[in-house]
Image (spheres, helix red, strand yellow):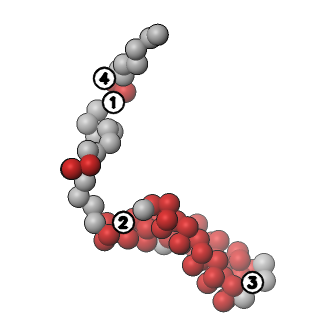
Amino acid sequence: MESTKFSPSLSNSDLLPVKKEERNWKAFNFASIWMGCIHNIPTYATVGGLVAIGMSPWQVLAVILVASLILYAALS
């Protein structure tokens, strides 16, 4: 069986996973990423599209809330 060795040109310290003891992100860091994923132009266009197809503002807010919670769960 062939051993699996990685080419040095395909891996470096910036791309390797961080060791558990070196991880220093807190809840604020994850919240910042989460908010950055939510507040962008495609999201606003999607919200406008939901209103344009006839959803009420409350329905759109519910969709945003559910989508945000799914995204939060995926990031944490």
Can you tell which mark lies on residue 55?
Answer: 3
> x, y percentage for residue 13?
26, 36
The residue that label 1 is drawn on is 11
In three-dimensional space, the C-alpha distance between marks 4 and 3, rounded to whole angstroms, equals 52 Å
Q: Which amino acid is tagged 2? A: Phe
> x, y percentage for residue 71?
52, 65
In three-dimensional space, the C-alpha distance between marks 4 and 1, rounded to whole angstroms, equals 5 Å
Label 2 residue SS: helix
Query: How many neighbours does mark 2 have within 10 angstroms: few (below 14), some (14-19), or many (20 or more)?
Result: some
In three-dimensional space, the C-alpha distance between marks 2 and 1, rounded to whole angstroms, equals 25 Å
Q: Residue furthest right?
A: 54
Can you tell which mark lies on residue 27?
Answer: none
Asked if 7 appears above or below 41 in the picture, the reply is above
Asked if 32 appears above or below 48 in the picture, the reply is above
Asked if 13 appears above or below 25 in the picture, the reply is above
In three-dimensional space, the C-alpha distance between marks 4 and 2, rounded to whole angstroms, equals 31 Å
Classify residue 27 by image quadrant. Answer: bottom left
The residue that label 4 is drawn on is 8
Would residue 60 be visible to someone looking at this image?
yes
In three-dimensional space, the C-alpha distance between marks 1 and 3, rounded to whole angstroms, equals 47 Å
Mark nearer the N terminus (2 vs 3): 2
Q: Image check: 6 left or right of 56?
A: left
| Residue name at image x 50 percent, y 70 percent | 38
Q: Which amino acid is tagged 1? A: Ser
> x, y percentage for residue 63?
64, 77
